[in-house]
Amino acid sequence: MRRLTALEPEQAPDKSREVLNEIIGRRGSVGEMVSTMAHSPALLEGYLSFSRAMKKVKIPRPLSEKISLAVQEWIGCAMCREAHTAGARAAGLSESDIALARQGTSTDAREAALIGVAVRVLVEPSSLTDEDVAGLREHGWSDRVIAEVVGLVTLNLLTGAFNLLAGIEPKAATPAS
């Protein structure tokens, strides 16, 4: 059930209106989450800036989608899971890869180690140890990638938690006739 309403640009606070109009000018429309975030100019600007910044991570796109799927499985945001499942398919992941990612793992031990730490960053960050970081380094992950995992997890928490609070859910599939 929808709890927060999506805003049209003319309904939004001034700063959010500017941002929404700029996005509409570039893309033709804004998504439901962004138009709902427009209630708070600070949140909207923060999300968009953070999202743009996280597009520059060194984590390969297929692995980024696997991490996002694992994290969203814990958070429980159906909208995000749907979006990241589509993103995973677009990045070339198989249905098996997607299912394993939703379970927080991968057939690749190197990826599984990074995904596992990402889930722990979300659910039990105080449990992370020197050995965990050393293990990621032993798998060949750089400090940059290790640091970027925290950003990716945080972005997923922001979007998932917002969608859940706002009541944003996937559209019901319409039966084919």
Image: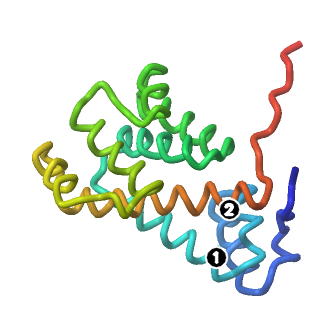
Residue 111 point in image, percent of width and height = 28, 38
Q: Is residue 149 above or below residue 66?
A: below
Instruction: Quote the CA–CA distance across marks 1 and 2.
Output: 10 Å
* Residue 29 seen in render: no
Q: Is residue 85 above or below residue 143?
A: above
Q: Residue furthest bottom?
A: 14
Residue at 84% over, 68% down: 7
Q: Which is nearer the N-term, disc 1 or disc 2? A: 1
**The disc label shown at residue 43, or none:** 1
The residue closer to the viewer here, 109 or 170, is 109
Badge nearest the viewer, 1 or 2: 2
The answer to whether the residue labelled 1 contacts the one labelled 2, judged by CB atoms less than 8 Å apart, is: yes
Q: How is the image coloured?
A: rainbow
SS state under label 2: helix
Residue 175 point in image, percent of width and height = 86, 19
Residue at image mark 2: 162
Q: Exactly how many numbered labels are in the figure?
A: 2
Kind of residue sitting beneath label 1: Leu
Residue 158 point in image, percent of width and height = 58, 63
The residue closer to the viewer here, 82 or 120, is 120
Residue at 41% over, 44% down: 67
Q: Residue furthest front?
A: 127
Q: Quadrant of the C terminus?
A: top right
